[in-house]
Image: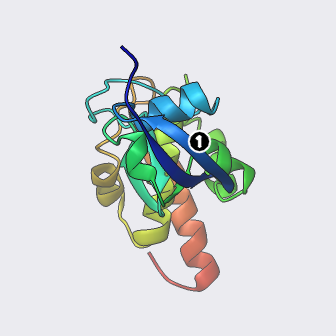
Amino acid sequence: MSEQRMHAKFTVNGESVDAQVPVRMHLVDYLREEMGLTGSHLGCEHGVCGACQVMIDGQVVRGCLTLAIQADGKVVQTIEGLSESRELLELQAAFLEHNAFQCGFCSSGMLLTALEITKHHKQASREEIRELISGNYCRCTGYQAIVNAIESVLAKSSSESGVKV
């Protein structure tokens, strides 16, 4: 018995996708298996760890809880696309500087969360950063290095805009 598919059109990292999508396939599986975009990882597959995160229409979502067909008519950005567009450049440099990458398994999801923080929570305190990343598991860093990296980007951004943190 073949799996039911539906027609979907969406954009992934600036590339138009026009495909017959398996109706029960999760977005992260589609991105990894059908498009070869393996930067988003499968961790818990229950929406708890954050390793599968991608952006849909500019909002971070759990790729393991989102069906690929739900991307129909939407814009999807993955860690690959955001890295290629250089949108993550400052955060990636800060993660390197503060040794926040370690094994790298959580990094793609953590960077998407960090990007959201730097866009929407520009005055976040260390405590708030810790709260905002709490949906992302990291087994290597103890989170200090990640918080330090995000905090450094926020501090640099506020000093460049003349805002005191």
**Can residue 144 be seen in this snapshot?**
no
- Please give the residue where the numbered disc 1 appears in the rendered image: 98
Q: Quadrant of the C terminus?
A: bottom left
Instruction: Report whether 9 appears left or right of 141.
Output: right
- Residue 36 x/y as whole percent: 64, 29
- Residue 122 x/y as whole percent: 45, 72
Amino acid tagged 1? His
Q: Residue at x 72, y 57 (%)?
A: 85
Q: Nearer the viewer, residue 24 or 111?
A: 24
- Residue 107 x/y as whole percent: 52, 36
Residue at the farthest bottom position? 162
Q: Is residue 4 above or below residue 6?
A: above
Q: Is residue 4 above or below residue 78?
A: above
For label 1, count other residues whose C-alpha is less than 10 Å away and answer few (under 14), some (14-19) or many (20+): some
Q: Secondary structure at mark 1?
A: loop
User: Which quadrant would residue 79 be assigned to in this image?
Assistant: top right
Instruction: Report whether 33 appears left or right of 62.
Output: right
